[in-house]
Amino acid sequence: MFLAGSVAAARDEDRATVRSFLSEGDEAARRLGHDANHLWTAFGPTNVAIHRVTTAMDLDDVQVAIDLGPRIDTTGLPVERQARHALETARAPSAWNRTDEAMAVVLAAEQKAPEQIRHHAISRQLVQNWMRRGRGRPSYQLASLAQRVHVAA
């Protein structure tokens, strides 16, 4: 509850509540002591760290997300969580028009979890933004990704 609440609070721009929920998440993860996937929760210290990146982006703290996102090792989590984190990690450099860096993150995640990347709303949103920002024809790599995520090139 507290991690979902942290995202909702971030979208509401309620920083105090975000801090409170993430603190509760940290405490629960500390008590658990490791990452676990009981009843598909993928809960543990790594998931709390992932939520720090997500809430940072929702609060427009792009530098925080850029600093934290790539450092989180998600290899012990289900592939769905890995892919979702990759999309959040890609949102950060994309926010600063670092399209090549962001696209590299998405393409790497697509190698691990193609169905997750190709059918996620954040993937489409990122690709749409990159297509709009571009001047002239998109690169082959971007045009190909746009086709796979069903964004008109």
Image (cartoon, rainbow, N blue to C red):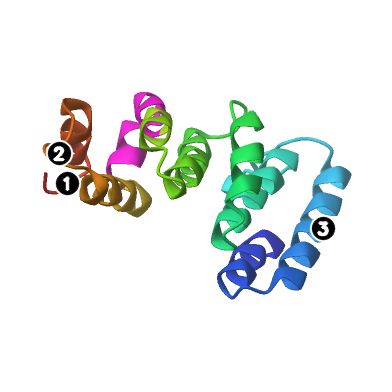
Q: Is residue 26 above or below residue 145?
A: below
The 10 Å Cα crowd at callout 3, few under 14, some 14 to 19, many 20 or more, is: some
Which is nearer the eye, 56 or 83?
56
Residue 117 lies in the magenta stretch: yes
Q: Which residue is mark 3?
A: 23
Q: Is residue 85 left or right of residue 110?
A: right
| CA–CA distance in space, label 2 to label 3 | 41 Å
Q: Secondary structure at mark 1?
A: loop
Label 2 with label 3: CB-CB less than 8 Å: no
> Which residue bears the numbered disc 1?
150
Q: CA distance from mark 1 to mark 2?
A: 5 Å
Distance between the Cα atoms at labels 3 and 1?
38 Å
Left or right of residue 12: residue 108:
left
Reading the chain from its start, which is encountered first: label 3 or label 1?
3
**Residue 115 vertical placement versus 152 (above, below):** above
Rendered residue at 77%/63% (across/down): 19
Q: Position of residue 63 (x, y in %)?
A: 62, 46
Residue 150 in picture, x, y percent from top left: 17, 46
Residue 126 in sight in this render: yes
Q: Is residue 26 left or right of residue 73?
A: right
Left or right: where 75 falls relative to 94: right
